[in-house]
Amino acid sequence: MKKSILTGLASGIIIVIIIILFTSVAELFFPVPIVPLSDDNIQHTQLVFIQSSLGLLIGKLLAVIIASLSGGFIISLFKGKRSIAMFIGILFSLLAAFYTIMIMKPLWFWLLLISIFLPFILIGFKAGVTISHRSNSAK
């Protein structure tokens, strides 16, 4: 049980770090639009996303895909169970849903962001299991 919690925690931390890093790279190629500051932080963030380029939004989606694949792979490397991968995928999907409901991004972005986490974490988990089985059978 303790190992499962640590595996999930490690995977979650890695997912967040990868999302931050890849989003920062996407912002180098597609700068965040400059929007006048307002007293309402949520309204300011909404304006930034409304005026964001398509490339920036796609870059954010790619960051989530890469992070999800990596998170699932990390869970399998730590010999975690599929249920942990599913839990992390559902947790991040719910967090993404709450985040996007607050910000009200474009609908297509909202739907893709919510639907990306679980399948790609499970794909990364399956890839890690396959690789570990191949390396164990080669020994």
Image (tube, helix red, strand yellow):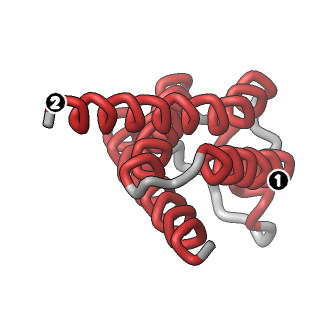
The crowding category of the residue bearing disc 2, from other C-alpha atoms within 10 Å (few below 14, some 14 to 19, many at least 20), is few
Q: Position of residue 42 (x, y in %)?
A: 78, 60
Mark 1, residue position: 98
Mark 1 nearby-residue class (10 Å; few <14, some 14–19, many ≥20): few
- As displayed, is residue 132 above or below residue 14? above
Could you tell me which residue is drawn at 38 percent across and 37 percent down? Answer: 128
Q: Amino acid at mark 1?
A: Phe
Residue at x 51% of width, y 54% of height: 80
Q: Quadrant of the C terminus?
A: top left
Q: Secondary structure at mark 2?
A: helix
Residue 43, compared with residue 53, is above or below; it is below
In the picture, measured across the screen, residue 28 lies left or right of residue 99, that is left
Residue 59 position within the rendered picture, expressed as x and y whole percent measured from the top left: 46, 32
Depth check: give the residue in front, 13 or 57.
Answer: 13
Look at mark 2 in the image and give the residue it sits on: 138
Is residue 76 at all visible to an observer of this figure? yes
Q: Determine whether 108 is above or below 85 in the image.
A: above
Give the residue type at disc 2: Ala
Q: Say if 126 sits above or below 23 in the image.
A: above
Q: Which residue is depicted at the point 52% across and 28% down?
A: 123
Q: Find residue 81 and report its horizontal and vertical position in percent.
A: 57, 50
Quadrant hosting residue 54: top right
